[in-house]
Image: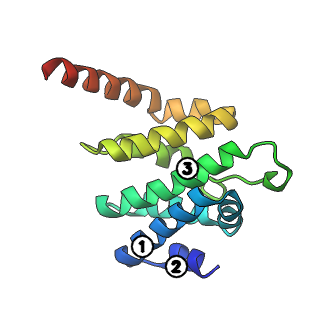
């Protein structure tokens, strides 16, 4: 509970980064802990930080923590205690925030985090696919693939 207060209320970059790293570790180690974090509003808090922060040193650990929660959620679909849990709950522009990660310049790890989350979210909430496409996810993913392919040809 205290950890989620740090994540949700902190504006200090160091506190946000440290809290996000702990959330990521906990979510990767236990689905029960991931569920508790999500029920306490962890997904919404992390999305809010992704929306607000321009600091790339903050964005990556926050995105990694949210990815860990989204992956735990995706792997737990159909389990009764996860019914009604949505990692993107409370943020109307959640899919657009995730697509925004794909648009960050020269940040492959952030692109990967965003792409993985979009994949899991759209797999389990197909109604978000159209919004993701409208926000530019498909165009950006195709461009990323083309850039990677071109880099491979140049080396």
Q: In front here: 94 or 38? A: 38
Q: Residue at x 60, y 82 (%)?
A: 2
Q: Residue furthest top?
A: 153
The answer to whether mark 1 and mark 2 are in CB contact below 8 A is yes
Q: Residue furthest left?
A: 155
First in sequence, mark 1 or 2: give its number: 2
Instruction: Answer few, some or many: residues within 10 Å of disc 3's Cα (few below 14, many 20 plus, some between 14 and 19).
Output: some
Q: Nearer the viewer, mark 1 or mark 2?
A: 1
The answer to whether mark 2 and mark 3 are in CB contact below 8 A is no
Q: Which residue in the structure is indicated by mark 2?
A: 6
Measured Cα–Cα span from mark 3 to mark 1: 25 Å
Q: Nearer the viewer, mark 3 or mark 1?
A: 1
Q: Which residue in the structure is indicated by mark 1?
A: 18
Q: Nearer the viewer, mark 2 or mark 3?
A: 2
The quarter of the rendered structure image containing the N terminus is bottom right
Q: Which disc, if any, is residue 153?
A: none
Q: Which residue in the structure is indicated by mark 3?
A: 93
Spot occupied by residue 4 in the image (x, y as percentages of width and height): 59, 74
Q: Quadrant of residue 124?
A: top right
Q: Is residue 3 above or below residue 62?
A: below
Q: Is residue 84 left or right of residue 60?
A: right
Mark count: 3
Dot 3 falls on a residue whose secondary structure is loop
The answer to whether mark 3 and mark 1 are in CB contact below 8 A is no
Instruction: Answer few, some or many: residues within 10 Å of disc 2's Cα (few below 14, many 20 plus, some between 14 and 19).
Output: some
Q: Residue at x 37, y 56 (%)?
A: 60
Spot occupied by residue 67 in the image (x, y as percentages of width and height): 52, 50
Q: Is residue 101 left or right of residue 6?
A: left
Spot occupied by residue 53 in the image (x, y as percentages of width and height): 37, 63
First in sequence, mark 2 or 3: give its number: 2
């Amino acid at each position: 509970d205290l950890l989620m207060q740090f994540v949700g209320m902190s504006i200090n970059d160091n506190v946000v980064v440290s809290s996000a790293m702990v959330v990521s570790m906990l979510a990767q180690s236990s689905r029960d802990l991931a569920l508790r974090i999500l029920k306490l509003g962890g997904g919404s808090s992390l999305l809010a930080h992704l929306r607000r922060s321009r600091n790339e040193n903050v964005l990556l650990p926050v995105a990694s923590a949210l990815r860990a929660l989204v992956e735990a959620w995706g792997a737990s679909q159909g389990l009764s205690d996860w019914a009604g849990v949505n990692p993107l709950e409370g943020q109307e522009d959640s899919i657009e925030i995730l697509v925004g990660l794909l648009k960050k310049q020269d940040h492959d790890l952030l692109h990967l985090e965003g792409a993985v989350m979009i994949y899991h979210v759209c797999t389990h909430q197909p109604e978000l696919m159209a919004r993701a496409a409208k926000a530019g996810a498909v165009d950006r993913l195709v461009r990323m693939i083309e850039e990677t392919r071109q880099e491979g040809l140049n080396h």
